[in-house]
Every structure is written in C-alpha cells, then in structure tokens.
Image (cartoon, helix red, strand yellow):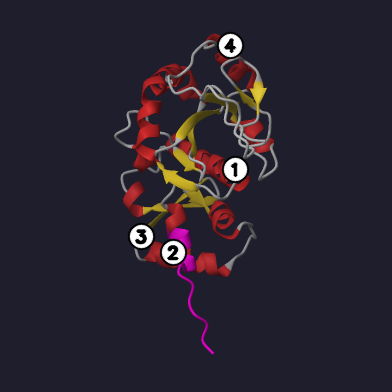
C-alpha cells in the first residue's frame, strides 16, 4: 500500500532551510534537516544536485569545501570575495548552534528584518514571545563597525520587537579573541536599550537577561557542545559578567 506522502519532502526541507541563510555546506544542511551529519547522504546529495542543475541553487568552492546558496540570494555575490563568504558561512554556523539548543522556535531570516533599521543576520522567535537576534562580526567588522552597530540597536530594537510581537535580545558574536570581547564590553559598560527587561526571569525557565545586548567570541561558542549554546554561561552582559541565555 502506498504511504501518504509527508507535507514536506526532503526537497522542501533543504530549500526552505537554505533560504534561511546565504551560504551553506553539505554538513550544515544535513544538521539542520536531519539532525545529524554523515559524509555521504544520498537523498540530500540528490536534492542539491537536482536544484543546482535547475539553477535554483548556486554552488561555489570555499577552499576545498563545496557550498550552496539560493541562486536568488547569491546571484550578485562576487565569489572571489572570500571574506564575504566566510562571514555568511560563520553566520550559518551560529544559527545552527542556537537552533539545536531549542528547536521549538521560528527561524527568522535576514530579509524579514528589513525596514527595521538594524538588520540581524538571523533571528529565532520562540513560542513564549521571546526572540534572539544575532549579529556575527568578523575581526574587521569589530574594529570598524561594532560600536556603531550596538548604538544603532538601542533605537532599532524596539521596532524589531513591535514588528515580530516579541521581546528581543541581541547576541553579538565576534570573531576575535575572548579577551578583546571582554575589553569591548568594558568600554561600553553602562549602555542599555529602552527595551531592557525590568522583571525577574519567567517561571517557564527562560532566563532572557535584564539587559538586551550580549557578546561572545566565535571560538568559545564553537567550543560549546551542540545543543548547549543557550545554557552555556559564556555571554558577556553590559555589566561585564558572564551569563547563559536560558536555564
């Protein structure tokens, strides 16, 4: 007897997930669509080849790794600008880390933040109307733009919260040594946004911080076991102390 087909085919899952970011490796796609990675997975490979041949996915090489992106989102990307591709691959990796920590949220891709002033790389909105907005910054970005980004989020976060009907925090993930993150937070000490929470953690176990800006270095985030990113006490708050984002 024929089985009733699932609403989402593997093709739907892969294309929908790839649309949440810009560039992806096969490993990243498998983790988000299967929950695990194996060096060879024929169903995923078939989808990637079929969609690439049809012109719906753009492929490129980052070093020795083949990467994939929606053609509609990456058609104007200069493939020789490896710094841009590196940024997007790292952003995808951070998304995976947070998603595995709590999978009942709604992924919010970058384009949905347009019109809010500040545009996070990605977001996750949870059923309890809490929302994480993520900003990944390379070392050059940290030196040139981070301070202005943080300042701008002070005014723009409220607009993001109103658009998505959620209480938001912004996690700045910085590709610099942890000591530099600590020093930056120290220089910015005392900054707070008008949307900072003023109530204790909710009874359902979420511990979204009292202040909405948190900072972590990329290497430390990667060192945390998959599934533990929200609970690891690795995030510098405005007071210079380290906290988890949830219990």
Highlighted magenta segment, given as a residue range: 1-15
Q: Which residue is mark 3?
A: 56
Gap in Å between the C-alphas at discs 4 and 2?
45 Å
The x, y position of residue 167, in whole percent, is 46, 33
Q: Nearer the viewer, residue 28 or 161?
A: 161
Residue at 58% over, 24% down: 176
Q: CA distance from mark 4 to mark 3?
A: 46 Å
> Decide: marks 4, 1 in contact (CB < 8 A)?
no
Mark 1, Cα crowd under 10 Å, few <14 / some 14-19 / many 20+, is some
Left or right: 227 as drawn, with respect to 77? right
* Magenta-span inclusion, residue 221: no
Q: Quadrant of the C terminus?
A: top right
Pointer 1: what residue?
Answer: 97
Where does the image place residue 101, in percent across and percent down from the top left? 62, 44
Q: CA distance from mark 3 to mark 1?
A: 26 Å
Q: Is residue 217 above or below residue 14?
A: above
| Residue at (40% x, 38% y) in the render | 165
Are there few (<14), some (14-19), or many (20+) residues within 10 Å of tag 3? some
Question: Who comes first in sequence, dot 4 or dot 2?
Answer: 2
Q: How many marks?
A: 4
Query: Alpha carbon of mark 4 to alpha carbon of mark 1: how far?
Result: 26 Å
Q: Nearer the viewer, mark 3 or mark 1?
A: 1
* Residue marked by disc 4: 186
Q: Is residue 174 above or below residue 3?
A: above
User: What residue is disc 2 on?
Assistant: 12
């Amino acid at each position: 007897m024929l089985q009733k087909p699932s609403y989402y085919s593997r093709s739907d899952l892969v294309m929908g997930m790839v649309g949440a970011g810009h560039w992806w490796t096969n490993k990243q796609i498998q983790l988000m669509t299967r929950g695990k990675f194996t060096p060879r997975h024929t169903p995923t490979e078939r989808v990637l080849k079929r969609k690439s041949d049809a012109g719906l996915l753009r492929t490129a090489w980052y070093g020795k790794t083949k990467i994939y992106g929606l053609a509609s989102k990456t058609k104007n990307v200069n493939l020789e600008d490896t710094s841009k591709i590196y940024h997007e691959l790292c952003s995808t990796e951070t998304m995976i880390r947070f998603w595995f920590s709590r999978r009942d949220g709604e992924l919010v891709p970058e384009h949905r933040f347009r019109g809010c002033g500040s545009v996070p790389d990605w977001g996750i909105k949870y059923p309890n109307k809490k929302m994480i907005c993520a900003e990944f910054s390379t070392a050059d970005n940290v030196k040139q733009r981070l301070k202005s980004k943080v300042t701008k989020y002070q005014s723009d976060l409220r607009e993001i919260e109103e658009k998505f009907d959620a209480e938001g925090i912004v996690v700045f993930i910085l590709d610099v040594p942890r000591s530099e993150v600590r020093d930056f937070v120290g220089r910015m000490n005392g900054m707070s946004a008008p949307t900072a929470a003023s109530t204790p953690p909710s009874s359902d176990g979420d511990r979204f911080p009292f202040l909405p800006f948190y900072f972590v270095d990329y290497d430390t985030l990667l060192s945390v076991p998959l599934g533990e990113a929200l609970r690891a006490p690795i995030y510098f708050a405005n007071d210079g102390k380290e906290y988890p984002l949830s219990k």
